[in-house]
Image (cartoon, rainbow, N blue to C red):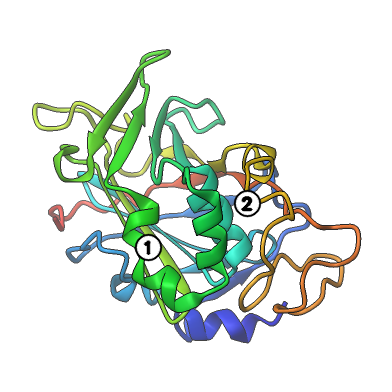
Amino acid sequence: MNPDRFKVFFSPGVILLSLASLVGCSNLEMTSTWCDRKIAIDGIDSEWQETMVYVEDADLGIGLQNDETFMYICLGTTDRRVLAQIIGLGFTVWFDPEGGKTKTLGIRFPLGMHDPMKLRQALQDQEALERDLAYFLGNELEILGPEEGEQVRRLLSVTGGIKAGSAMSAGRFIYELRVPLSPGEDYAYAIGAEPGASIGLGFETSRLEEMVEQEGFRGGLPPGGDGGRRRGGGVPGGQGPPEGRGRPERLELWMTVNLAPGDGEPAD
């Protein structure tokens, strides 16, 4: 992996973080940056230029910020294999206020694409994918928990303090999420943590086989754009996956996040 490719993606200040066997790894730790500005949850990463960390083995850029009221998350990728999993299977961000890997509160967005043939075609046509991204993402999200078995579906426009948004431009996919830290009168759903605490944060898609077995994906997923997952000497993007690796791994990543303890006023 050439880190310069992702430096162009985000900024000259991006950090390269490469960990062996990252997917499912349990020792990844990151620190949230104190948020001193308003962050628009619009899929544009202009507020994240100096805070993104590139996790090489997951082919994701990750940015974390918080103020006294909210935690903000930004993810980015140029890898169409990762994007196929997020859009096709659905994507959930999990929070554990105790700092472990318990799935206490989950925000699922997008919910998953039910037209795999159209998605496959769009993944091979960058202009079509960018033009029709809103269709593939949908206009709803699901809140999972915090009570066992609790599952609520909401329109993106009426989710209380939770906000999610994504956009794509020039082959770059950006995902943003805002979640309240503590429950309150205005926020029924929250992480259950205070600034300065350590929490568990997880990212996952559903099982890859659920998408591959659907009509339109029986031939496997399309090759990566600027690059598929390239561990162990994989080939550059555009040439398909290495022999014997026709399917990318399911995205499943957990980390410990140390929230910034700042004492300023909330930025949003």
Disc number for residue 204: none
Q: Is residue 51 at least partly visible in the picture?
A: no
Q: Is residue 264 above or below residue 258?
A: below
Q: Is residue 62 at least partly visible in the picture?
A: yes
Residue 247 percent across, percent down from the top left: 76, 53
Question: Who's the residue at 27% across and 38% down the image?
Answer: 181
Of callouts 1 and 2, the N-terminal one: 1
Q: Nearer the viewer, residue 197 or 205?
A: 205
Q: Secondary structure at mark 2?
A: loop
Q: CA distance from mark 1 to mark 2?
A: 18 Å
Reading the image, the residue beneath label 1 is: 133
Looking at the rendered structure, the kind of residue marked 1 is Leu
Q: Secondary structure at mark 1?
A: helix
Q: Would residue 231 be found to the left or right of residue 127 on screen?
A: right
Question: Who's the residue at 46% across and 27% down the image?
Answer: 98
Q: Would residue 89 be found to the left or right of residue 67 on screen?
A: right
Looking at the rendered structure, the kind of residue marked 2 is Gly
Q: Residues within 10 Å of mark 2 (few under 14, many from 20)?
A: some
Question: Who's the residue at 18% across and 40% down the image?
Answer: 161
Reading the image, the residue beneath label 2 is: 216
Residue 231 percent across, percent down from the top left: 80, 65
The quarter of the picture where the N terminus appears is bottom right
Residue 242 percent across, percent down from the top left: 85, 67
